[in-house]
Amino acid sequence: MIEGLTPLQLVVSACIVFAAFVVRGMSGFGAGMIGIPLLAFLMPVHTAVSMFGLMVLFLFVFLSIRDWRDVVRDELKRLIVPTLLGVTGGVLLFSHLDNRLLLQLLGGFLIAYALYAFAVHYFGLPEFTCSPRWAFPVGFTGAFIDTLFGGGGGTLVVIYLHLRGVGRAPFRATVAALWLVEMTARILGYGAAGYYSGETLLLCALLLPLMGAGTWAGERLGNRISQESFSKLMALLLLIAGVSLLLK
């Protein structure tokens, strides 16, 4: 597969990975939402999804160890069990669902929430909060959708933690710890399906330094912006995610 990529395509792939993880470093999410669709223009989709998933797994291992003190443990405990159940449900029920309808519903919801978040900042609408009781349905549904489509569902967890009032650093640490568990389960599934050839692993190894550099740069940019700007960035990414899901 690497032999099928020209030097220019390898450079473009490296730039995509770097840019995607700059966004992830700034916001705490969004790498797959940006990176996978762009990499799919250069390589098979299943290769992009499995390779990107492995890179994200390495990142989440590092971040979970580094930022464990910032994790909101109560929220993590509420979300971890429904997340694992969601991964299981996604595997078991994949063939029985109208996948396109599910993507459209999620996309519409993300667009509506992003517009609401912008209205809070620019038009003074009241900002709502949510009860911890939402952790189970959110965790389950997010992991369920992630398992079906390789991403997208995690944005529901992003919205939940935002409505719970979790600050920037605890937010990034908590989603990293939660998604480490989810990604581990998904990687096992990708491996069982035979998506990790030697060439895929080699390409992942070649691009890992760009993942690290992008994350480093993104975190430093993100730490320089205010909490309000961070919320606006999150709303913009959710809007992009919603539109991309509607267009799938």
Image: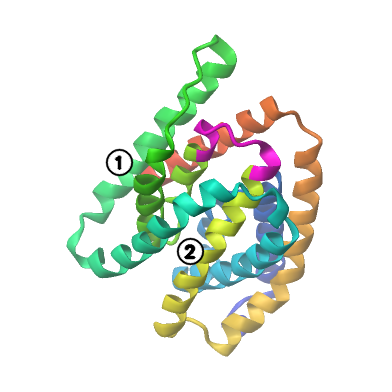
Range of the magenta residues? 161-170
- The mark nearer the N terminus, 1 or 2, is 1
Q: Does residue 44 appear anywhere in the picture?
A: no
Q: How far apart are marks 1 and 2 (CA)?
A: 22 Å
Q: Vertical placement of 180 versus 130: above or below?
A: below
* Residue 79 pos. (x, y %): 45, 52
Q: Where is residue 178 in the image (x, y as percent from the top left)?
A: 54, 57
Q: What residue type is labelled 2?
A: Glu
Compare residues 219 and 11 and report the one nearer the observer: 219
Magenta segment, prevailing SS (helix, strand or loop): helix
Crowding at mark 2 (Cα within 10 Å: few <14, some 14-19, many 20+): many
> Is residue 178 among the parts visible in the rendering?
yes
Q: Cβ–Cβ below 8 Å for labels 1 and 2?
A: no
- Say the numbered circle drawn on residue 105: 1
Q: In this rendered view, identify the residue nearer to me: 170 or 12.
A: 170
If the image is split into quadrants, where does the N terminus sit? Answer: bottom right
Left or right of 166 in this view: 224:
right
Q: Name the residue under label 2.
A: 182
Q: Say how many tags the image has.
A: 2
Q: Residue at x 37, y 35 (%)?
A: 109
Furthest residue to the left? 96
Q: Residue 39: x percent and y percent?
A: 56, 63
Residue 160 % position (x, y): 47, 38
